[in-house]
Image: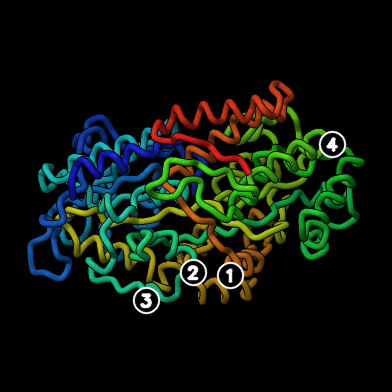
Amino acid sequence: MKKKVVSMLLAAVVAIGAAGCGSDANTSTKTEGQADAGTSSQTGGDTDNQADAGSDSEEGKVINIYSWNNEFSQRVQAVYPEVKETSSDGTITYLKDGTEIHWIINPNQDGVYQQKLDEALLNQADAAADDKVDIFLSETDYVFKYTDADADVAMPLTDLGIDPEKDLADQYDFTKVTASDVNGVQRGSTWQCCPGLLVYRRDIAKDAFGTDDPEEIGQKVKDWDTLKTTAAELKEKGYYTFSSYADTFRLYGNSISQPWMAAGETVLKVDQKIMDWISDSKEWLDAGYFNKTVKGQWNDDWNKAMGSESKVFAFLFPAWGIDFTLKPNWDGDNGAWAVTNPPQEYNWGGSYIHACTGTDNPKHVKDIILALTADAENLAKISQDYAEFTNARSSMQEAAENDELYPSEFLGGQNAFKYFAPVAENIKMAPLSAYDQGCVELIQNAFSDYFQDQVDFDKAKSNFETAIKERYPEITEIQWP
């Protein structure tokens, strides 16, 4: 793997705010005294130096894992059978054979995580054995950047001795496609599947519609046209349908028919579905179906919109969104919220586990990936302990039918898997590109000013063009539908 190629590809995307799967900037386990791993260079190495997972070569004594929060660390500690104990500060997990897992955690915000990871990847070939990156995680918004075949920073799973067709046969197909390069070679795996639902306030439903039954509410939100009529009913009762125009973006973004910018091209193409989101958002905001004071997501106003004093009826969340975001912001009793089908199927998030090219611990890495993403019992435990919809089709179908084993305390005993499972079966991932995360952020930022009547439509377009070219200087043209 040549540094020049890697440098160009990894520079293509700059990370943005906490908009990913279970993002939690306050769970960092990295400490200043920890082996320079988080700030210097560790991984990426030449394929010539790549260890063979099937060889008898001695494994290293340190497994360096890069992530943006402690979610993966928690899952490893919960289900990986080789774990002996974890240090009190959470930075090191000790395995039974004496190997140490060092957790290098940097927050997603402001691109810190990707910046630190990219620095390590660029120096992987020259890093000492105990400083090499062995595993790193990526999110759906930027996974394409790291699975790029030319960059070759994420090893093909087959090079570890993992057969995706056999070992990962129970995974949802779209997650396998998402973790693959353009040639269809799978370079990552995930324990998560992140179908999204509509999560609503039961008390508001009863006041507005006379019922909070999930099946009946599901009929009132079954598609966008029906939901628009329902939004008018909610407004008459003094409620907002959603908190912000940003809440609906993922559903439109999941439906684009072409990548923002195809590999090797310099022309960025804005899909018609993005334009539909812009026009619909403006209409809904002007009609009073969104709260005008809530500008975007991941801010204080958005968090408060999930509180008991809010007039917001619903949010669009996957399982991690309910657990990591809604639940901590709710200040009332359990059972106040319920889930039902969304107006269209969508996926939001997903943390992908990658074996880093150049790792000196291929056997351990293979074992961890299989334990976390291919072991049915482990995945069932994660679903039960963390209310996660995991990447095992058969297990999730069983969970959907087992109300006794999978009740959600937060949802008042409701089995959310009953609603997650059919959505997961129908998800079709939009074509990915290395520019997804920046485009998703900047298009929303630019048109937020338009929604708030601070600029006109043409100025918002111009502002997006300026911002996206500043972030990605290689873009020569923006084509609007």
Kind of element beneath mark 2 = loop
Comparing 289 with 28, the one in front is: 289
Q: Which residue is mark 1?
A: 425
Comparing 258 with 452, the one in front is: 258
**Of pointers 1 and 3, the one earlier in the residue sequence:** 3
Comparing 119 with 134, the one in front is: 119
* Coordinates of residue 74 in the picture (x, y in percent): 39, 52
What label sits on residue 287 in the rendered view? Answer: 4
Alpha carbon distance from label 4 to label 2 = 38 Å
Q: Residue at x 51, y 28 (%)?
A: 467
Kind of element beneath mark 3 = helix
Q: Residue at x 37, y 63 (%)?
A: 372
**Of pointers 1 and 2, the one earlier in the residue sequence:** 2
Q: Which residue is mark 3?
A: 165
Q: Give, as a three-letter code, the residue at label 4.
A: Ala
Residue 380 seen in the current view: no
Residue 473 seen in the current view: yes
Kind of element beneath mark 1 = helix
- 283 left or right of 179? right
**Of pointers 1 and 4, the one earlier in the residue sequence:** 4
Q: Which residue is mark 2?
A: 172
Q: Give, as a three-letter code, the residue at label 3.
A: Glu
Alpha carbon distance from label 3 to label 2 = 12 Å
- Mark 4–mark 2 contact, CB under 8 Å? no
Kind of element beneath mark 4 = helix
* Coordinates of residue 174 in the picture (x, y in percent): 49, 65
**Of pointers 3 and 2, the one earlier in the residue sequence:** 3
